[in-house]
Image (tube, rainbow, N blue to C red):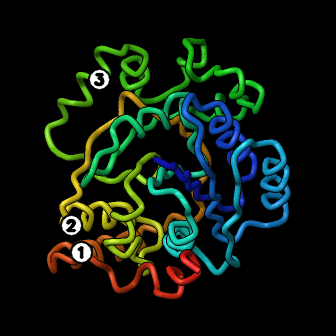
């Protein structure tokens, strides 16, 4: 298969730099990387241009102007632009473990999506981490930084091959879609219309995953076998009223058993992709 990695970002070039450093050391390299950029400024553009010259695979910057939180819109543009038949999604503040893409590839199957987990780094570790450390694989080894993480159980289990595989296969129900670390076939993403662009921050991933499930695409867990490391940062865009409105939208879509959103991938996007 050809794997297209889609990384979402917005004005956080330091974090994006570490994510790209993590992608540069995958045991199974991506065939292409697309940065789905929700309107970042010149610093992010310069960073991507620099990495374009360094990486052995194509790196493309999919950008639109900053008009508020429009992550779903830019993700749809990246889906339409992707040339691979399999899509792996990461958030721009989540550094993949060195074998993350290899696990996603290994668990890929028809009518399936793969949902990973994350280890939460605290503010101190997040601030001290640099590109050189990521490149050396520090996060894939035991170290004193383990003291500064949440979900320590997940971190410990991720280093124990037999146990991590067992726990991933014993999840009680299909896992939800986790946009920070998830994958599926491009055909499945297109079949449900991509992401519903009415969603802003909150429940956009849950809605996408729910529509995949209704389309017969079943989730499997790799939360222990393919973790990402989440950098701690502020969330100035978080708004409880907006999240509540998104929850109501998610509930309505679920009650109506919406599979293909009419507010997602547009015919124009698909024409741009296939033209």
Spot occupied by residue 187 in the image (x, y as percentages of width and height): 37, 64
Q: Real-space Cα distance between discs 2 and 1?
A: 6 Å
Say what secondary structure mark 3 lies in.
helix
Which quadrant would the C terminus be assigned to in this image?
bottom right
Spot occupied by residue 204 in the image (x, y as percentages of width and height): 39, 66
Which numbered disc, 2 or 1, marks the residue that appears first in the sequence? 2
Q: Real-space Cα distance between discs 1 and 3?
A: 31 Å
Q: Is residue 70 among what the camera can see?
A: no
Q: Is residue 169 above or below residue 268?
A: above
Determine contact: label 1, label 3, CB under 8 Å: no
Spot occupied by residue 3 in the image (x, y as percentages of width and height): 51, 49
What residue appears at the point 64 percent right and 28 percent down from the top-left corner?
125
What residue appears at the point 75 percent right and 31 percent down from the top-left corner?
130
Which numbered disc, 1 or 3, marks the residue that appears first in the sequence? 3
Q: Quick check: 4 left or right of 164? A: right
Which numbered disc, 2 or 3, marks the residue that appears first in the sequence? 3
Say what secondary structure mark 1 lies in.
loop
Q: Quick check: 56 left or right of 258? A: right
Q: Is residue 47 among what the camera can see?
A: yes
The residue pinned by badge 2 equals 215
What residue appears at the point 52 percent right and 72 percent down from the top-left corner?
80
Q: Real-space Cα distance between discs 2 and 3?
A: 27 Å
Say what secondary structure mark 2 lies in.
loop
Determine contact: label 2, label 3, CB under 8 Å: no
Q: Quadrant of residue 165?
A: top left
The residue pinned by badge 1 equals 259
What residue appears at the point 49 percent right and 37 percent down from the top-left corner?
101
Is the residue marked by circle 2 packed among few (<14), some (14-19), or many (20+) residues within 10 Å? Answer: some
The residue pinned by badge 3 equals 165
Q: Quick check: 170 left or right of 91? A: left
Determine contact: label 2, label 1, CB under 8 Å: yes
């Amino acid at each position: 298969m050809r794997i297209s990695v889609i990384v979402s970002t917005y004005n956080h070039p330091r974090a994006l730099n570490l994510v790209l450093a993590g992608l540069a050391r995958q045991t199974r390299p991506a065939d292409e990387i697309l940065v789905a950029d929700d309107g970042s400024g010149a610093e992010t553009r310069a960073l991507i241009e620099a990495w374009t010259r360094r990486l052995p695979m194509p790196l493309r910057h999919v950008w639109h102007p900053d008009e508020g939180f429009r992550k779903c819109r830019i993700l749809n543009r990246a889906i339409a632009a992707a040339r691979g038949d399999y899509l792996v999604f990461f958030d721009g503040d989540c550094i993949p473990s060195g074998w993350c893409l290899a696990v996603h590839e290994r668990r890929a199957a028809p009518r399936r999506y793969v949902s990973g987990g994350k280890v939460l780094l605290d503010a101190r570790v997040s601030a001290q981490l640099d590109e050189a450390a990521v490149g050396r694989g520090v996060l894939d080894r035991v170290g004193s930084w383990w003291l500064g993480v949440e979900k320590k159980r997940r971190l410990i289990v991720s280093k124990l091959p037999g146990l991590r595989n067992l726990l991933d296969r014993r999840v009680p129900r299909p896992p939800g879609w986790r946009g920070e670390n998830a994958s599926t076939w491009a055909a499945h993403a297109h079949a449900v219309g991509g992401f519903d662009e009415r969603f802003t921050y909150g429940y956009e991933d849950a809605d996408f995953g729910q529509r995949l499930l209704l389309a017969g695409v079943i989730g499997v867990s790799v939360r222990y076998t393919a973790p990402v490391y989440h950098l701690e940062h502020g969330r100035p865009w978080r708004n409880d009223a907006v999240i509540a409105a998104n929850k109501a939208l998610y509930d309505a879509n679920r009650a109506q058993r919406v599979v293909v959103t009419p507010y997602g991938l547009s015919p124009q996007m698909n024409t741009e992709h296939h033209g």
